[in-house]
Image (cartoon, rainbow, N blue to C red):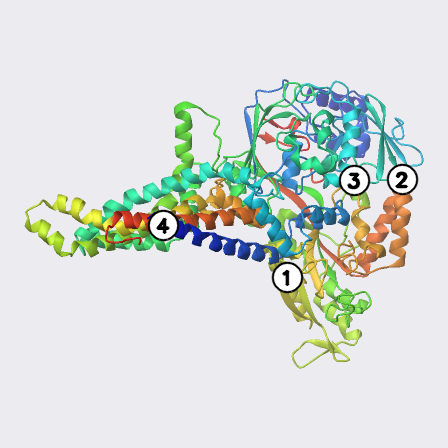
């Protein structure tokens, strides 16, 4: 086990280096520059623009800039944002709690819907319930989040006036009122994301359970005279959930990464919207840092998923 | 109007029963010019303060929260690093300049005790010195007094190239001296008729010396106060999350009596312009949203909700088309559109004249921009004294056809004109933006009817407006026959703005295409008029010279103005705000109130 972990970690290093090199080169070669807004403003003399480019090191060759970035990164210096001139790690840390709360809750909501619905549908395949669940799941993951988001805003904010559609990270209230306000503003984005995830999870859970439910040991369990509930929950679900757990683990980077489109629609100050703003402002250090963090998370959670898999399913060995 | 009636009117203004504006309107109806009517009020002891927004509340505070929504989120709060209007708006909440610009382009004192003039001895006869008297008794948010040292320091800070301030342009060529604790003198190298640049408006916000002194030059980025501002403004800093939200509270020691009205201020950022308008006009979640570049149709539909209204004020932005008189398709010495080349057909003034007749400005305004712009034939439109009255526009396809026929451009078998084998076939580029693409279509269709073939090209804004030397699609390289964009006249004075028409500013390979004259067209008369205007101290003569520069380019039809853009904002019905196209939206935030 230890040797396996070590091997995997050693493999991760060159792949992360490769990822960072590709990201950096693509970003450096992409058109646009962070000072475009100054270009049409006659009050900013061209020399100032040039001096800024030079002081931000934008005129050096790509390899020099990459090596500088890499050595700083190794020392824990993530660089600073061109747009707000503060350190990138501070900027990212400010966004993490909101993203974790919104995307995390939506994942929990998705699982709370997907598990019971998927399992129940699989135990009664092609029943009325299964058909309806399947159709809804299809609709659910066919509708993009920006569509359902706008639909909810139109219904619940504009027409009914129930919920606000602008998310505020600090609510000027305390105690129960704070929780109530938080609930009001978070319910729409969480629903949008949660239902979208739930739709794909439901189909996944259903097919995983269907695979297991036909196996001989389940028949044996039934033949022993165990109740239907016990068979489903203790014998079927436990085994069926092994691939589902892996799937959820692989989804974790997405939880940290936020939901770019949904964050934009509801103005949620999460990591996804940070990335979008940085891209629009050509704020390369921020884009680089955020995408690199995503890359690290993907590599890390892949490893965790593999380890979890082995731990849940003793048939798999790491040697 | 009898004297008695006038007296009664003035008395009503004093009581607050009649607004300044309606007084001036009534006075104008009987033939009194607005400046005169204004003076009349001043002589009668009605304060000049808040010329554009009468302030009703009788005590400071008690207004509850004010919530503003900027769809581009502020990312920093140091006004001298503010790269865009979003940051300027946010930093203006805390910092103030000596004077700001109101919506009619007049100076309004903020940290200055009065506006310098020849009469009060603030302006020297040779136009080389300005003396500013600073307001007494102003305190920074940390309780320290505001003095001339702070103003002098602000100049040192911004002028230092190592600071890399975006406002350097306003400070690098001047000298500032302290006369006494509340008087400073600004010294220019040459006579400078437009002196209200340093310490004024968006570039003029004063920084506290005691907090920034250690962070001048290369260390400027490390100043903790870049993100936790301490200023003199109407609201004090509470919390800031870059790219998300800014909160502030009322400054109880504000230097204007009874201001500000609101207890707390929240500036939320992010999202897009349409939903920002919706949050103010339809759901009423926010009180104010700025820079709503949204089609007027959509705004009108939202306004029917009755919760808010749109405010559009003139600004210095002009949407225009530029024709290329150099050849964008031939490379000379490593650059295209070089002034060493000549465009095969656009050098012919007749072709350019015909093109100008093919732009249906009225329809563009009516169907695309609505309240967002006013059709115009003049490059400079505001303030009114700099607008050319001579320039007129016309949409007339028959006339264009006639001109082209007379100039010898014959229609080929495909209906497109050519002369000596040179076809009237142009590439027309602009940035990607829905109204611009619609505009391109309208112009293309009209040109087709006159036998001119237009190929449309649209480029992502972040590329088109970048200064990336390696990219051929930037607007300053102008590797196309014609292009369209908006350019900004930042101050209510067009001198610096018109430097894009002078020969020494031509964008070329040598200056990495950073030159301001993108059209590359030059005219000796324009150069001369421009240099003369830079020294002319008589305001009327100077305006005439600057108008001449504008007219030379518009009459040569190299520059074809389309619309004078307005600054559009949405506000809740009960919010009284003071929105100016010449300064940040928050320039007079202290005087905002809820009625």
Q: In 3D space, how far apart are the residues under numbered discs 3 and 1 (Cα atoms)?
A: 36 Å
Query: For residue B355, what is the image quadrant?
Result: bottom right
Looking at the rendered structure, whether the residues under marks 3 and 1 are on a common chain is answered as yes
Q: Does label 2 or label 1 sit earlier along the sequence?
A: 2
Question: Is mark 3 in CB contact (under 8 Å) with mark 1?
Answer: no
User: Based on the displayed image, in which of its 4 quarters is residue B309 positioned?
Assistant: top right
Taking the image as drawn, is residue B371 in sight?
A: yes
Asked if disc 4 and disc 2 are in contact, CB closer than 8 Å, the reply is no
Asked if the residue at tag 4 contacts the one at tag 1, i.e. Cβ–Cβ closer than 8 Å, the answer is no
Measure how far apart labels 1 and 4 are at the Cα level.
Answer: 65 Å
Q: Distance from label 3 to label 4 (Cα)?
A: 64 Å
Of the two numbered discs 3 and 1 in the rendering, the one whose residue sits closer to the viewer: 3
Q: Earlier in the sequence, mark 3 or mark 1?
A: 3
First in residue order: circle 2 vs circle 3:
3
The residue identified by callout 3 is: B170
Report x, y in % for residue A217. Answer: 13, 53
Q: What residue is shown with label 4?
A: A3
Q: Which residue is mark 1?
A: B440
Q: Position of residue B440 (x, y in %)?
A: 63, 61
Discs 2, 3 touching: Cβ within 8 Å? no
* Marks 1, 4 in one chain: no
As rendered, which of B59 and A148 lies closer to the eye? A148
């Amino acid at each position: 086990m230890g040797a396996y972990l070590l091997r995997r970690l050693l493999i991760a290093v060159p792949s992360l280096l490769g990822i960072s090199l590709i990201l950096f080169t693509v970003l450096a070669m992409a058109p646009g520059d962070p000072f475009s807004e100054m270009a049409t403003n006659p009050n900013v003399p061209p020399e100032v623009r040039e001096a800024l480019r030079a002081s931000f090191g934008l005129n050096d060759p790509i390899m020099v800039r990459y090596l500088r970035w890499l050595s700083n990164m190794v020392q824990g210096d993530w660089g600073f944002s061109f747009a707000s001139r503060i350190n990138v790690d501070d900027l990212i840390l400010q966004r993490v709690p909101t993203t974790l709360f919104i995307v995390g809750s939506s994942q929990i909501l998705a699982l709370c819907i997907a598990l019971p619905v998927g399992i129940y549908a699989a135990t009664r395949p092609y029943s009325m319930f299964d058909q309806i669940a399947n159709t809804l799941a299809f609709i659910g993951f066919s509708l993009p989040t920006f569509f359902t988001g706008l639909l909810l805003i139109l219904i619940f904010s504009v027409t009914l006036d129930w919920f606000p559609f602008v998310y505020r990270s600090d609510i000027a209230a305390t105690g129960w009122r704070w929780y109530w306000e938080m609930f009001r503003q978070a319910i729409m984005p969480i629903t949008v994301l949660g239902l979208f995830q739930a739709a794909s999870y439901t189909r996944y859970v259903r097919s995983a359970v269907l695979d297991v439910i036909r196996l001989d040991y389940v028949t044996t369990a039934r033949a022993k005279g165990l109740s239907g509930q016990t068979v489903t929950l203790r014998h079927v679900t436990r085994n069926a959930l092994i691939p589902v757990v892996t799937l959820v683990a692989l989804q974790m980077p997405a939880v940290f990464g936020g939901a770019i489109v949904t964050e934009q629609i509801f103005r949620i100050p999460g990591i996804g919207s940070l990335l979008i703003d940085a891209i629009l402002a050509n704020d390369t250090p921020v884009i680089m840092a955020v995408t690199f963090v995503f890359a690290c998370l993907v590599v890390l959670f892949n490893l965790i998923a593999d380890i979890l898999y082995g731990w849940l399913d003793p048939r798999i060995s790491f040697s | 109007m009898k004297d008695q009636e006038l007296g009664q009117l003035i008395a009503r203004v004093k009581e607050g029963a009649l607004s300044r504006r309606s007084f001036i309107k009534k006075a104008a109806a009987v033939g009194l010019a607005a400046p005169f009517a204004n003076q009349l009020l001043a002589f009668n002891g009605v304060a000049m303060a808040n010329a554009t927004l009468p302030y009703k509340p009788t005590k400071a505070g008690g207004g509850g929260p004010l919530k503003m929504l900027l769809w581009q989120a502020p990312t920093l709060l140091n006004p001298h690093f503010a790269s865009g209007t979003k940051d300027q708006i946010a930093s203006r909440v805390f910092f103030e300049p000596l004077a700001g610009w109101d919506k009619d382009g007049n100076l309004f004192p903020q940290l200055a005790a009065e506006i310098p003039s020849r009469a009060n001895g603030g302006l020297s006869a040779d136009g080389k010195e300005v003396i500013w008297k600073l307001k007494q008794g102003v305190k920074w948010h940390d309780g320290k007094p505001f003095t001339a040292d702070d103003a002098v320091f602000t100049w040192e800070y911004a002028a230092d190239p190592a600071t890399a301030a975006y406002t350097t342009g306003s400070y690098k060529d001047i000298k500032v001296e302290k006369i006494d604790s509340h008087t400073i003198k600004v010294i220019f190298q040459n006579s400078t008729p437009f002196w209200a640049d340093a310490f004024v408006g968006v570039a003029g916000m004063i920084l506290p010396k005691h907090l920034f002194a250690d962070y001048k030059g290369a260390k400027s980025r490390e100043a903790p106060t870049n993100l936790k501002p301490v200023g003199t403004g109407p609201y004090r800093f509470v919390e800031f999350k870059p790219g998300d939200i800014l909160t502030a509270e009322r400054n109880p020691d504000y230097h204007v009596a009874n201001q500000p009205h609101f207890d707390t201020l929240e500036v939320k950022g992010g999202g897009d312009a349409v939903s920002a308008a919706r949050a103010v006009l339809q759901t009423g979640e926010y009180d104010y949203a700025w820079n709503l570049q949204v089609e007027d149709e959509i705004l009108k539909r939202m306004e029917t909700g009755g919760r808010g209204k749109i405010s559009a004020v003139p600004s210095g932005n002009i949407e225009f088309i530029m024709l290329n008189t150099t050849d964008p398709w031939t490379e000379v010495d490593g650059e295209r559109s070089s002034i060493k080349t000549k465009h095969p057909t656009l050098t012919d003034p007749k072709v350019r004249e015909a093109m100008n007749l093919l732009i249906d400005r009225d329809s563009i305004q009516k169907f695309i921009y609505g309240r967002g712009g006013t059709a115009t034939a003049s490059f400079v439109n505001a303030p009114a004294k700099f607008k050319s009255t001579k320039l007129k526009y016309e949409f007339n396809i028959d006339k264009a056809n006639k001109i082209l026929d007379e100039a010898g451009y014959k229609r080929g078998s495909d209906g497109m004109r050519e002369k000596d084998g040179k076809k009237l076939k142009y590439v027309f580029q602009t940035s990607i933006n829905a109204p611009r693409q619609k505009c391109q279509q309208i112009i293309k269709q009209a040109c087709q009817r006159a036998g001119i073939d237009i190929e449309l090209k649209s480029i992502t804004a972040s590329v088109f407006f970048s200064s990336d030397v390696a990219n051929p699609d930037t607007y300053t390289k102008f590797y196309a026959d014609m292009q369209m964009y908006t350019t900004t006249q930042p101050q209510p004075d067009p001198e610096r703005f018109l430097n894009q028409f002078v020969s020494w500013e031509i964008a070329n390979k040598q200056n990495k295409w950073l030159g301001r004259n993108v059209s590359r067209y030059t005219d000796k008369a324009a150069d001369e008029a421009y240099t003369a205007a830079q020294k002319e101290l008589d305001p009327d003569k100077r305006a005439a010279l600057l108008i001449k520069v504008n007219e030379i380019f518009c009459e040569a039809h190299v520059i074809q103005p389309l619309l004078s853009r307005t600054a559009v904002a949405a506000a809740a019905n009960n919010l009284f705000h003071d929105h100016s196209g010449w300064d940040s939206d928050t320039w007079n935030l202290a005087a905002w109130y809820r009625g």
